[in-house]
Image (spheres, helix red, strand yellow):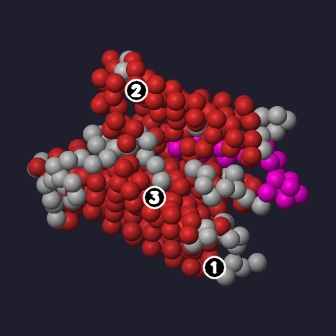
Amino acid sequence: MNDPRKPKRVLLIGVLLALLAIAILLGLMIGAVPLSAKEVWTALFSGTESEARQIVWNLRFPRVLIGLLVGMSLAVAGSFMQGVFRNPLADPGIIGVSSGAGLAAVAVMILFPQHIAYLPPVAFLGALFATGVVYLLAWKGGAPTGRLILAGVAVNSLLGAGMTALMILNSEKVQSVLPWLSGTLNGRSWQHFDNLLPYAIVGLVASFFLTKQANQLILGDEVAKLLGNRVERSRLLVIVASTFLAGAAVSTVGMVGFVGLVVPHIARIFVGNNYRFLVPVSALGGASLVILSDTAARSWFDPIEFPVGILLAICGGPFFLYLLRGGMKGWKMS
């Protein structure tokens, strides 16, 4: 049966690809030293050493690519979380990703600053560990969404308290922790990109293979079972993939919020709940949003590097309130 909305959805993906290309170009052009599109092109594809080439290749290009992967990872993870929990307020943080990564990162920065180089993998492991605890606490012959949400709230509260206690007991070191907690791409390099890339590729590829299961889970457990879906197995796979994506992103750039919450809502308004289209639209939208937000954060407040996480919260909060007032129209089944 033909989907009458398919042409519009395909067109939307094309528009988002164009928007992403523009966002990448702006990210490479705008900064303390503005560059023209021609200078960026020459810096990227000419072997001639120049100041522009150093700025583009060593500073802006890795930062833009990290923003791309982070935006894609958080948005796709958020879209899956909202679907598997059938909850418009769900995001990666609901299963302990942010709080687990946050506590692990704060512990490294405050208690073991000499091992700061291990912060990304430690934060990633913290995210996976917290999610595992949430799932085990919720398991009782199965892990229904209600129990998962309640376990997630409890674990998030406990880990958040631990994070706050660490900072209060070591108040003289809090200044070094704040940029990471705020979420920032400042200082991110090719090494950070190389560390993030394999996790993002694995998570994003896995997400495309999980679209069928997600489409069934959003209908409810009983309906999914009637369709032959092994609900608990599918839910676990979706949660693991989402944790993998969000944990990798958070461990690289810190606690960037609202991407996994707001972007899937916007995507649903245009493409509905079909994950075959929701996943790519969320990925492209999340990537564009993070790149454009980071470009604005480092240029509007020059010479200060404003954390992109704060800017996203400032912009995302009012928009999310607008969605609430609109009755979450994107959640109408289609």
Identify the residue at horizontal 57%, vertical 50% (top origin).
91
What secondary structure is found at the residue carrying circle 3?
A: helix
| Mark closest to the chain's N terminus, 2 or 3 | 2
Q: Which amino acid type is shown beneath numbered disc 2?
A: Met
What secondary structure is found at the residue carrying circle 2?
A: helix
> Can you identify the residue that label 1 sits on?
5
Asked where in the image residue 272 lies, by quadrant, the reply is bottom right
- Magenta range: 220-247
Q: Quadrant of the N terminus?
A: bottom right
Q: Are marks 1 and 2 in contact (CB under 8 Å)?
A: no
* Separation of residues labelled 1 and 2 (CA atoms): 51 Å
Q: Which amino acid type is shown beneath numbered disc 3?
A: Gly
The foreground one among 171 and 288 is: 171
> Can you identify the residue that label 2 sits on?
167
Left or right for 72, reference 23: right
Identify the residue at horizontal 77%, vertical 40% (top origin).
143
Left or right for 52, reference 145: left
The answer to whether 196 is drawn above or below residue 112 in the figure is below
Identify the residue at horizontal 48%, vertical 53% (top origin).
258
> Can you identify the residue that label 3 sits on?
317
Specify the farthest residue to the right: 226
Identify the residue at horizontal 64%, vertical 39% (top origin).
152
Which secondary structure type mostly characterizes the magenta part of the structure? helix
Residue 115 seen in render: no
The foreground one among 270 and 318 is: 318
**Percent position (x, y) of residue 28?**
25, 57
| Mark closest to the chain's N terminus, 3 or 1 | 1
* Separation of residues labelled 3 and 1 (CA atoms): 30 Å
